[in-house]
Image (tube, helix red, strand yellow):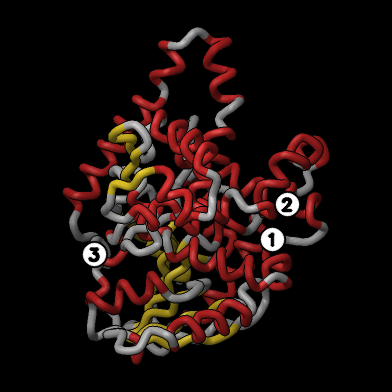
Amino acid sequence: MSSLQKQSLQAWAFGWAAALANRLQRLPNRLAPPPFRLIQIGSAFWQSRALHAAAELDIATLLGEQTLAIDTLAERAGAQADGLQRLLRFLAAIGIFELVAPGQVRNNRLSQPLRRDRPGSVRSMVLMHNSPAMSRPWYESLSASLRDGSVPFERCHGQSLYSHMDAKPEMAALFARAMDEVEALSGDSFATAFDWSRFRRLIDVGGSRGAKSAAILRRHPQLQALVIDRPVVVQQARDWWAAQPGSSCRERLQFEPGDLLSGPLPGARDAGDVYLLSAVLHGLDDGGAEALLRRLAHAVGSSGATVVLMELLMPEQGGDISACSFDMQMLMGTRGRIRTPSQWRSLLARAGMQWQQTVQLASFAQMLVLRPQA
């Protein structure tokens, strides 16, 4: 199989920059006295809670491109001026927002992605990760779950993450918006560094509202896409797209409800089909991931279709802050994990799949190209 890799130089440059950033992140551990550094880390939730409050009040969107007096901003946000001034002073001290004069504030490079009205926003992701449903397990259940092996989210809420979202449409909608914002973290290299021109149909398994599929379709007019996800997610996706008239790719984007854990997957027609699973398998334990991969192999059959997993890989030894952070997120909410290459190889072999290529991205993730074993 010839290489599906494109833009290899950009991927290499991103990897080099990410490694440098990871080393710089560890610099405070060397410079600060250990007791002081531990207290800094132990109180880091103050920063995330302050950021969450600013996102809830939608401060960045209210500011836009303007410099506003705190009193004016407080009135627009429905907040009390003194408390808001102290919140923004704290956030500005860690680099979010800019105090340009006494009592005046504006957006800066770091606060701009909190705006709802800009591409690359991560506001919904900040709101989701700091929501009561997602925060409570960290405060209430982590230590106990480490002792008995339970999932902190399930211990706290009495149900799985996905069952919880199915029962609470507002949480499911926030989760879907947050998943759409992953592109702001990963960039568009999943659409540009992989050679999608070889395919005619994209089957996006667990594709939420179809943001990734749409990004790929916009760049590849020969493609059609079918997004498979839970029924509640598919209904929200259809409603959302119905409110987007004139989208250049909407007519090539279809949705179909399905049970990713046990239901059948659409069968491949020929080698022009490609299945995409973006950040799906890291939310499943090995048994669930193996079962889904086996169903994928069955769906592909002898058609010659390709399977692509977009996943973050954990190094065999140690781990950078990004991989370890996502792995903790999986520990908190699911029985999944961020897997090492050797763990992937073992899992794929048991599921009857061959790992044929790795497409490097200018992103924290990689694309693993698979085919069923002959």
User: In terms of sequence position, does the residue under pointer 1 or pointer 2 come before the other?
Assistant: 2
Q: Secondary structure at mark 1?
A: helix
Mark 3 vs mark 1, CA separation in Å: 32 Å
Residue occupying image coordinates x 54% and y 21%: 40
Q: Mark 2 sits on what residue?
A: 153
CB contact under 8 Å: marks 1 and 2:
yes
* The quarter of the displayed image where residue 204 is located: bottom left
Residue occupying image coordinates x 50% and y 37%: 87
CB contact under 8 Å: marks 3 and 1:
no
Q: Mark 3 sits on what residue?
A: 192
Q: Nearer the viewer, residue 156 or 256?
A: 156
Mark 1 vs mark 2, CA separation in Å: 7 Å
Provide residue 85's location: percent of width, then percent of height.
46, 37
Q: Nearer the viewer, residue 40 or 13?
A: 40
Provide residue 217's location: percent of width, then percent of height.
29, 79
User: In terms of sequence position, does the residue under pointer 3 or pointer 1 come before the other?
Assistant: 1
Provide residue 369's location: percent of width, then percent of height.
38, 63
Q: Can the viewer see residue 324 in this picture?
A: no
Q: Mark 1 sits on what residue?
A: 161
